[in-house]
Image (cartoon, grey):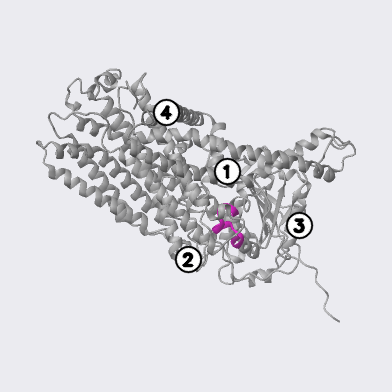
Amino acid sequence: MPPATQAPPPPGPALELLVHGVGGATPQEMLEDPRVVRITGDTTAAIYRRPADTDAEQHPERYRDRPIEEAYCWSNLTSGNGSRALWLLLLPFMVVNLAHWMRPTARARTRTVRLYGVLVRLVALSLTVLLTASVCEVALDLTAWQCAGVADCSGRRSWLGFLSSAQGGWWSQPGRRLAVAALVPTALVGLLWFLSNRTWSAYESQRPLTGSAPDEADPETGDDPGAADATASRSALGRPGFWYGRRLVARLRAAHTAAGFLTVAASVAGAAIRHDRAAPGPVPGVLGGFIEVALVLGALVVLWVVCRRGRSERRLDNRLDRALITYLPGAALTLLVLAAVYAALSRPGWASAGALPGHAAFGIVTLVQVLLVVLLAAVSLGLYRRTPEPRTVLYGLGGPVVAMLACALGGVMTGGVAQWVADWLDGSGTPGMAGALIEGPPVLLSWQAAVIPVLLVLLVIPGILLLVRTWLKARALEPEVDREYGPKQPDPARTRQIARIRATAALTDSAPWIIGPIAGAALLLGAAAVGGAWASGKVPGEAMKGSGPFAEAVARAAQSTGSWMIGFGFILFVTWGRRAYRDASARRTIGILWDVGTFWPRAAHPFAPPCYAERAVPDLVSRMSGWTGRTGGRLVISGHSQGSVLAASAVWQLPARTRGRVALLTYGSPIERLYGRWFPAYFGPGPLHGLHRTVRCWRNLWRATDPIGGRVGFDEVPGAAVDCGPLKDPLVYGRTPEHPLPEPVLGHFDYQADPGFAEERAALLDRLGPVLPHQAAAEKPGPVPSRSPSGDR
């Protein structure tokens, strides 16, 4: 008699781990229950369950027809207390940090990839110098040097009385006024250092799980992080050290802090050195020469530190360059103190006149930024031509474009502060023009303000073309909407609404062709502003005198309009930050911006807002590994919007044995539509195909009305059925007996309301299948078995 066939064992417990998207969500909303219990975690990020599910593992019989639901809530990482509003000041740093991760895919281009990283880090360093120089311009030049040196200006500001040259006090000498004013930019640099160090401890100090074998490739060596082969089937996001960049952040923090202190030292000592050379007095000139040499040597050391080392991802690097991060900022601060003492030495007869020497530094920094962006564009084009991918935005120029936008944003913010303070100090006059009390900020800032209206005019043209294109596409979609729903009595207004929403959602794919030309125009206009400022030495309105009534009127209009717009933008910026500090809802809106911008680690700028993924990804990896290892059950990680990016990143970090028990469910996901196009080296076709091969099963839901989420695009691969969509939205065209009220167009939200969501989740659990005890014991980390033609293992 043949042995009796044994019935297959019942499947083990199943868990659905929900991860919310941008804007945050409460665990009550995610679990659809007003009462939730925190299972693990803290007030910043935690995992929650319904009260009835807290002991679910002890009662698996209750969950034969549905999975256990857990919600991972990470919204407080980006939109917590009121201090998050201060992150608005770090916006240019966040944008330039994104440029580091936007490089095209590269294979065997070691030196080129390293050069790309060095160029981005140098652009980031220039932004730190620009920010510090702008604060020095406000505190040292406009306030201590110009206004305090003019009796009519200082007489209107009682708080400047002890610095006023008209009163002749001990602090009235120009060098001593500069030494006092240097406290403001020094405090700012110290605050940035403190925030960077504190946020690292609060957000990014979570060490990943150990035990994962390092990949052989490394982004700093030029190997393709998305290459998926027999030996390296994971993206760079799966490397042990990817979400733990402690060493690089510490090095960059030391270098940028030193650069800030050196910039303040140069601003304080520069005028005194020039005075001592022009009019020898009681202060020995050798002191000024020593400070100049020390400043040059310090700048060279900072450049060496920034260029010497990039990210190390192949292994978990816990080392710190303690001597470097301790002595470099300390030495720069010591030099700053020496410069302040040197400037404060008594120099009888020294009086401040005009503007503080050093205005040319703004033009030099702007020109350096232009050259760096041009070099970065050349490197990016070289990488893209070596490995072209059609879906990559702007033919691989996304990184240079974003770097240029960061420089433009930094220039507008710093110029806006200087222009606003100058107008406030001057009263009824216009700095730089006839009749003004003070000379005002560098003329370059006025030229940069004058190009803003021109840039906006250039923006109108592609904007109109895009609106016309969207209107035509909406008209073309109307017959398609009627065919899809097949209404007995078509409603033209309802059809137009659905078609318009679908056409508007497609605008996301056209964004690069708006951002790219604007960045190019900003590059050219920025270079023209530097040339105009250096050639004329005057503000645009004064420089164009005698060139004809029309040209003179246009120049004056552009200058005044640009200055007004910069001032208004600065006030709006401060108002928004103040409102966000007090209002939690406004802070949540800012948090949406950080959700997208601070996903990536701080690889270029250490003063950028902290990377929440360095906390969230280890949290998810630890939970999935711990739960599957303890229960031997099946797990579906379910991510919406930005949560789907976190989910995919966490799956990449899992050991092969754990990935065999995990399914990935994404919906409203920007993983290919945004991340795959803008960050091709990390979410391009290679990395995503590698993820598809290594994860047990993956399903992606999307809608045509969703402006953020989209397809993954594996339909052309045999058996790779990942995408499910487009889902019908709205579910019902008009009023029916079952739906007597109009159904809304859901767009990017409420994917769980679609009946297909529960069906796809159940199908994923079925594809995972039961894990037999002897199979689980025999599993070892190693290459993932190939898929069958149906897409299952």
**Which residue in the protein does label 2 denote?**
109
Q: Position of residue 239 (x, y in %)?
A: 51, 62
Q: Is residue 316 visible?
A: no
Q: Nearer the viewer, mark 3 or mark 2?
A: 2
Secondary structure of residue under mark 3? helix
Q: Position of residue 1 (x, y in %)?
A: 86, 82
Query: Which mark sits nearer the N-terminus, 3 or 2?
Result: 2
Residue drawn 83% across and 46% down?
484
Q: Are marks 4 and 2 in contact (CB under 8 Å)?
A: no
Q: Residues within 10 Å of mark 3 (few under 14, many from 20)?
A: some
State the CA–CA distance, disc 3 to disc 1: 41 Å
Q: Nearer the viewer, residue 102 or 85?
A: 102
Residue drawn 58% across and 43% down?
514
**Label drawn at residue 763:** 3
State the CA–CA distance, disc 4 to disc 3: 75 Å
Q: Which stretch is magenta? A: 676-687
State the CA–CA distance, disc 1 to disc 4: 34 Å
Secondary structure of residue under mark 4? loop
Q: Nearer the viewer, mark 2 or mark 1?
A: 1
Residue 165 within the magenta-colored segment of the rendering: no
Judge left or right: residue 621 versus residue 714. Answer: left
**Which residue in the protein does label 4 denote?**
548
Secondary structure of residue under mark 1? helix
Query: Which mark sits nearer the N-terminus, 1 or 4?
Result: 1
Number of labels in the image equals 4
Q: Residues within 10 Å of mark 4 (few under 14, many from 20)?
A: few
**Which residue in the protein does label 1 denote?**
514
Judge left or right: residue 503 versus residue 154. Answer: right
Q: Nearer the viewer, residue 298 or 690?
A: 298
